[in-house]
Structures are given as structure tokens and as C-alpha cells.
Amino acid sequence: MSATAVEARPAASRLERVRPALGRSWPAYLLLLPFLVHFLLVVVYPFLYSIYLSFFDAGLNQDPTFIGLQNYARLAGDPDFRGALLNTIDYTVVVVLAETTIPLGLAILLNEPLRGRTAARIALFLPVITSYVVVALIWSIMFNAQGVVNTGLQGLHLPGQPFFADGKQAMGIVMALGIWKDLGYYMIIYLAALQAVPRELVEAAAIDGASRARSIWHVTIPNLRPVTYFVASIATINAMQVFTQAYVMTQGGPLNATMTVVLLLYRTAFVNLQFGYGAAIGVVLLLLLVALSFLNKKISDWMGG
Amino acid sequence: MSSRSRSARTLLCGLALVAVAVAACGGSTGSSATSGQKVKLVFFNARAADPIEQALAKEYMRLHPNVTIEYLATTAMPGPSDTDAIANLIFNIQAKTVVDVAKVEVSRTPLDLMASKSILDLAKINGDAVNNQLKSLLNTNYVSFDKGVWALPYEYDPFGYVYNNSMFKEAGVSPPKTWADMTNVNKALQQKFPSTWSICHPLNNLSKIQPYVWGAGGTYWDRDVLPTRADFQNPGIVAAYQFAQTWAQNNWLNTSDINTTTSIQWMVSRKCAAMDFSAILAATLKINDPSQDWRVAQFPVKDASTKGANFAGGSALVIPSTSKNPKAALDFIMWLTSKEGQDLKYAVNPSLGLARTDVFSEAVPANKDTNKQLSGNADWKQALATSGVPTRASGVSPIYSTAYQQLADMQQRILLKKTNVSQELATTQQSVQQLIDQSKQKNPELYQGK
Amino acid sequence: MAQQIVDIHTRRGPALIVTRAVMYVILLIAGLLAVLPFYWMVAGSLMTPAEIYSQIPHLWPAHPDFSSYLRIFQLVPMGQYFFNSLLTSTITMVVATLVSSAAGYTFAQLKFVGMRFWFVLILATLMVPYQSRVIPLFVMFNNYGLFNSYLGIVLPGLASAFGLFMMTQFFRTVPPELREAALMDGASEIGIFFRIYLPLARPAVATLALLMFLQSWDQLLWPLIIAPRPDMRTLQVGLAFISQYAPTLNYQMAAIVISVIPVVIAFFLAQRQFVEGIAAGAVKQ
């Protein structure tokens, strides 16, 4: 993930001067040590182990047998994996697009001197601070075929919807939950960025006779490129790893319509107890995310962000 | 300002260190069975009824002061099957966690566990006592084969046609006995209650369509226990799936799957007038909506010429291979499945003070005596209505879990995607036969001489 | 650093009023949509099951029944669950914030061999789903007797790559001259961090602390696997069992509402801090 804009160029060269050479200020390493120790123990070792496992056929009460790249070959031809991958990419595209636009719109609104801004801000933050488990439970109760949403629709003389029974609608609900949950978070980020846009630019545009909407479109928004890049990066990484909503609400159904890569990994490793195959899924996901990050950076560089 | 924040930082660091120290000392792990009398058992509940099982463990400890029971439980999220919970148990066994007694689902798990050598043969610990105990228990189809006894049935969950008799009376019908009856009942109910389904059926579940297959004289396997051949193309099974598909095509059947929560919801909201489900649902519905007359009947059969059979799930108690005290574990299991234990569990003996609502979330007792005593109780009568119907095991074998999922997926496709029934049955038969052949290769001793 | 962008247009009249009205409506809808599910939870917890499931939509119970809240505490050991969540989340918050901040400072202000390699490696692990680490972690923890222990629950969360990233970003904006000057005055490296740079980072640290707390509070999978004993369950794990303790939906909804209240209260209290902190973390001055 990247930094936002404005790296202080002059400071950088001064920084070079005062940074210690290796060996001269070892107490500083004590500050880094806890993190590194934890990182190696709890993140690196298990992940390396799981990469190692991906080359084996490891299961219940059997000695792991080395099978080389067979797990990966199997993944390439596995329709369940392909389906999960497509679902996850679908989900990511929609959610990231939504999380880079809707919160921006809301932030622009909240930037205006309207009454009830604080209330709106608090309301939009409520989903952010609640856990995914709770939120998914509530939504699955509400969107159940006989739940309150359907009875509400029928009360308005609209047809009831299958929701979780229909693959497309189920996926739509999973996406909607993902978008709804983090709206407030990204909105705050955009809001802060909006308020950091130099006043002079906006006023200059106004003096030139630009309307309010015009000045927002042509002056403020272009300045938000680095923030947008930041939001898109985090949103992408989170979206590709979508798990809890699908696990709690649909368990991947109906008929694998909402199966995601991480949910498939969980099923493979924890339920079918195929640890090697599950590990392979994890490795492929990592490679995908790394590739996506590169892509993201390239796009941002190309757009001058 | 900075000195205040400095001391605040120091305080925080101190607190953090203390907290970490407390955390490291808090919580105990592992068993510490000392020499002599004292015994520690780890009881892992991979099914449901958390508060009740905890209460029973406490009671056992009270009756046997030398025994300490550490209670563990895991759960799938509300909604999905208990596959995840069982998987967690197996996962723990594989990770060599000490577990002495485990409560598991009965129709699939003991075989899975046995084939992977994760549980002990109870008959080897005390064959006479175990075989004697089995005589007093229901639902023993799944627990003994290959001369061993791999589990003791603990809860008995017979299925049935659960219906809202108040609605049926209003529409002037009584529960159907044949498939033709079902169509007539459907007409009458739809007339009176146009937005209600006359029958709701779990779409992603094999167990609840089996009675319809048996009711058409069909079958799934060449024999019920340790089948060597998958037989999904006999006329009875084809008729049953086609019957279900007709109902789905006419929109007389629900389009989304049912779990425990939605089963209650759909019945109480009058979206379904009847449901193929666990008979215990009737008792649960009574708590949720006492205003209706909830009842259970036998599954309808194809026509009067077939007798049909019922399916019963439930739970069982096993002793995992990581147990450190198999003898004490068996004593505990014997008590839990005895009349004494089950009377406490189902409040025939009310001394545990269990909430009435807790008890009703259970399946019915596996102990025959307790079962008989409950049938006189008005609250339990309906839940026990199909207890007497002969049940049939199906496909008891190490591959049953995987075959189950394939058959459930097939059913979903047939009902939701309206695919060709004969083709689906043929394809699935092929794939399940492969599983059986693999299993025969892997565990030949199971299939020997049969 | 909130700036008011002043509307310097003097044009008034119908166009402006319509625009304003539209903005209010949009904001109202957005706010309502955000709050609706929570409202439904509260309303449902006060209804009877027949009302909740009814085909006629009930917006508010006919006879609000608060007994579900009292009963829930009798049926479910909510107090124990709360304590476990509070303890584990607080430990995680304090330790993860400190450790990540210290590491972030090091990356931002100091130089050491392989710095770039470590930084990239740590960031890369953000892309590894933790589900793929859980099995080796569980086996390792089990072998060291951490099954069903508070330490087992908190250990994987005691440092955060995201936190590192955030604090590195922040500490990059602080001038290195402060350190230079302090060194010349004979201060220790560690002292410089705790006494000079860390206090400067207060908004970012507060935000990170809140995020770490929330992350730990909201976790389900790991605590479920590592601590299945009833007295060790965290709140989220307890909610996963709720249908076994509370057979009817209104009780389950009451449990959910109860679990959300403390987070909401904490948020209200720390609201300004939190919002400013996110802003500070994301956008450079």
C-alpha cells in the first residue's frame, strides 16, 4: 500500500544525514524488536508452513505425502475454485467502485453547512463500529424470505423477492452489506481530504465565475487522487478477502453463488480437512493480491496521483 | 504536559505487562489426571444444547466428587448444518487435543471418525455393559458394526410431517396419507390461504427426502449398512424426485432452503402450513406461538401399497482416540444414556431446574424408558408422535458424508434448476459409486465377508 | 484542522432551495438506511415471536416487552462474555498500539539494514488471509498449552501490519531535527521515542488504539477455535451460540442489542478523537 502525496522532499535529504549507520544506535532496535518477533512467530512462520503444506496431500490422521504442484494443477481445473474466484472478483469490482464513489458523494454533502450533519455522521458510523458477525446476523434475519424487508415490500404492494434463494440477489445482498458497513469509514477519510483542499484554489475558481458544482468537479475532486488511491487500495484488499458475511448469511449458497475464495479456503481446510489443498488456495490468493496491488499502483502512477 | 504523558505511558506499559501476565496465568489447559482416584474428563460438545449439557456435566460431578469434567463446545453459526462443529472436533482430535467424550451427530459422524481411527471401540473397553445398554436405546442403526460399538445413541431425532392443525381444520382437511392426498390438501389449502405453501421442504438436505423415496418403494443402496453399490436408478427413487420436481415446477414448494431458524419463522408466519422436518419442531413451535395447534403425522407414501419408513437423526456419544481415561469416559457415557441421566435431561426428573424452553430445543430421548415416560406429557406428545414409526438407516459407510453432500446438491439442482431427473440420478450414482470403490480400497477390512 | 469552505456565492432563490432540499433528502435517506437494521434489532427484541414473524409488518411492538433483556442475562453468561472480550480487546489494544507505533517510528525515522525488504514483506502479509494461518497457529498454540487461555486468544493480534503502515506514514511527517537535537542533549533513543515523538502522535495513536480494540472485539473465528470453553468465550463467540440458549428470536435480538451497546457508547465518548484521528492518518498536513 502506498503513502498519500506530498513527501517532503527537502526533509528527505536531511533525514539521510541524521539516520544512523548500522551498529551505532542499537537501542533503537529494541523499539523494532517486539514487532519483528511477533511478526516472525505469528505471521511468517505459519504462512511459510502453509506454503510448505500446499505441496503436500495433508489430511486427517494421515502422514502428509509430497505431491509437488498437483494441488495447483487441481486448482486450475477446479470449477468450484473458478466459481469462487469469479464471485470474489465480481464482489471486489462492485464494492471498490462503490466505496470510492458513494462515500465521496456523502463527504461532499457533509462538507456543506447543513443541519443535522453530526447526526448523519454518527448514524453512518454505526455500521462501522459494529462487528461483521452482528451485522450479518441482523441482515440475514431481515432479508429472510419471510423477513421484515419482504413483508415491508408486500405491505407497499410490491412483489416479495427471493433474496437468499436467488443466486444473483444473494450476491447482491452480500455486496450491499460489504458496501454499507464501511461507508462511514471511507466517508470520513474523504471528508478530511476535502477539508484539506487549499482554500485559495476553491476561491480562485469562484472568482473566475465557476458555479459551486463546477468548482467541486474541476478543482476539488482532482486533488483527491492520492486519497482515492488509498481508499481503493484498502478496499480492494479487504474485498478480495471477503469471508464473514458469506459465512454467516449464505454459507456460500445457494448452489455456490456466493462462494468466495476465502470461504472456499475455510471449507477446504476446516471442514473437508484437506489442509494441503486449502493452503494452495491461500497462496494463489496472495499472488493475486500482490498482482492487484501492482496494477493499482501502475494505474495511480499513470493518472498522476 | 510531556511529563504527564510520560507517566501516562509508563502506567499504560505497566498495565499492559500486568494484563499480559494475568492472561498468561488465566485459563488452564490440558488434563492433569493425578494418580489414584481423581479423574479429569474433557467433554466436547460438537452438537447443540450447550446449557443442558453443561448442567448435566455439573450434576455428574456432584454425584462423583472424584471426577472433574472440563466442558468444551464449538458451534457452527446459527443456520448452517453442524458440519462445521463436527469438523472442529475432528480438527482438535487431529491436533492431539485431549478429548475424552464427544457428543456428535449420529448418522454420519461415528463412521467418519471410525474410518479415520479417531475414536475407540466401546465394546473393547467393556463389551458386556455396552451391549446391554444398547438394548435400552433407540436409534442404534449407526453405532455398531464390524463387531465393534463405536458410539452410544444419546438423542433421537425422528422426522415427520409437521403441520398446523388449526389451519388444516379451517380448510377442512386432514394430514395426507398418500401423494394423491397431498395434491388434494394442496388445493384446499391454497384456496383458503392463497399465500401459504401447503408443504415446505428443506432443499439442501438429503435426510428429509429419503422417506419419500422409501414411501415409493425406492432405495439408495444395495444394502443399508456398508453398501457396496449405489442404486439411484430404481423406479421408486425416480418417482420420488420427479414428484418433488413437479411440485417445484408448479410453485407449490418453497424456493429457498430451510434451517432451524427459518423453520420456526415460516411456520409461525403461516407461510407454510406443513413442513418436512424434525418432529421436535412441533414442541418448539408451541413455545413460539401457543395459539396454534401444532401436530406431527407420518410422511405420506406414494400409494397405499407401500408401507414406507421414516428417517431419524440425532446425536451420539463417542470416545476419541486422544482420551486419557477411556474407562472413566465410558462410565460417564453410560450414565448420560441411562434412564437416570435422560430423566434429568428431559426434566422427567425436574431436579436440575432446567428451563422449560431449554428442554424443548432438544431432540427426544434415545433411552426407551425416558421416551415412554414423556409420551404421557402433553407438551411432548406431538414431538414423540413419530417415535414409534420404524426408522431405516441409509448408506451407513465412511463415504456417507461426501455422498450426502453430493445428493443434497443434486436435489437442489433438480428442484431449483429443474434439471432432468434421470440424468441427474445417473450422474450422481456414478460419482458416488466411485467414492464407494475408493472406500473399499482404503478400508477393505470393513467390507470383508459381507 | 476542519476548514469551513465558505459558500461565497450570493445567488439565492429557488435553484438554491431545491438543491438544498435534495441534499437534505439524500442525507436523511443515507442516515436512515444506516440506522434501520439497528432499529429493527431493538424493536424486535421487544416483540413476541408471532409479531416478529408475522406477515403483516410491525414497526413497533404492540406491547413492548422488556423482560427479554432481563431474561437474557439469566439464560446466557453475558457478564462473563463481556469480561472476556473486554480483557482480551484491551490487552490487544494497548500492546498492539505500542508495538506498532514503536515499529512505525523506527521505520520512519531510523535506518537499518534490509529496511525496505522488511517493510515490503510486512505490508505484503496484509494480503494473506488470516484463515490460511489459523491451522499452523492452532497446532503450535496447542502444543504450548495455550488452548483455552487468554494469552492464546490475544497473541496473534499483538502487532498489526496495518498499524505499522499507519504509524510509519504519520511519523514520516514529523521533523527528524527533534531527534537530532535530543541526541545532542544526550537523550537515549528509547527515551526520544517515548518522550518526544510518541506524544506528538496522540491523534494517530488514539485512532490506532480504537481500531485495534474494535478489530479484536469483532473477531470470531480465532477465539472460537482457540477458546471453546464456556467461561473463556468472547462476546462474538457467545453470540454464535446464542440460539442454543435463547430459543426464541426476541431473546436473540436482545442479546445482539446488548452486545452492540458498549461499542456505541465507547464510540460516542471517543467520537471526535476517532474522526480526527482517521483524518490525520489518511491525509498529510
Image (cartoon, grey):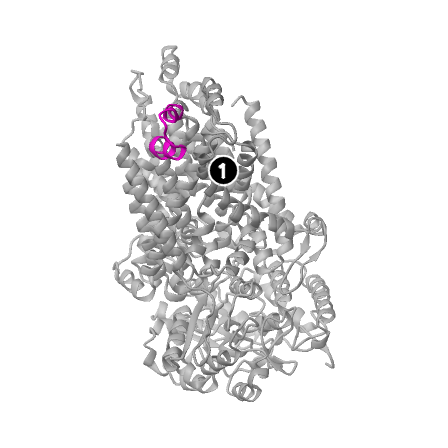
Relative depth, front residue between A25 and B317: A25
The extreme top residue here reads: A208
Could you tell me if residue B168 is visible in this image?
A: no
Q: Is residue C198 magenta?
A: yes
How far from the left and from the top, in percent, is residue A141?
42, 55
How far from the left and from the top, in percent, is residue C190?
39, 35
Q: Which residue is the site of mark 1?
A: A235
| C4 left or right of B435 in image | left
Could you tell me if residue C214 is visible in this image?
A: yes
The part of the image, by quadrant, that contains residue B125 is bottom right
| A185 left or right of C9 in image | right
Q: Which residues are magenta?
A: C178-199
Q: Which residue does the image show at 49% across and 46% down from the upper left?
A: A38
Three-letter code, disc 1: Ala
| A52 left or right of B208 in image | right
Label 1 marks a residue whose chain is A
How far from the left and from the top, in percent, is residue B274?
47, 69
Q: Secondary structure at mark 1?
A: helix
From the image, give the main secondary structure of the stretch colored magenta: helix
Q: Is residue B77 magenta?
A: no
Q: How many marks?
A: 1
Please say if A229 is above or below B317.
above
Crowd band around label 1 with a 10 angstrom C-alpha radius: few (<14), some (14–19), many (20+): many
The part of the image, by quadrant, that contains residue C60 is bottom left
Relative depth, front residue between A44 and A117: A44
How far from the left and from the top, in percent, is residue C86?
34, 52
Relative depth, front residue between A156 and C275: C275
Please say if B106 is above or below C106.
below
Relative depth, front residue between A82 and A3: A3
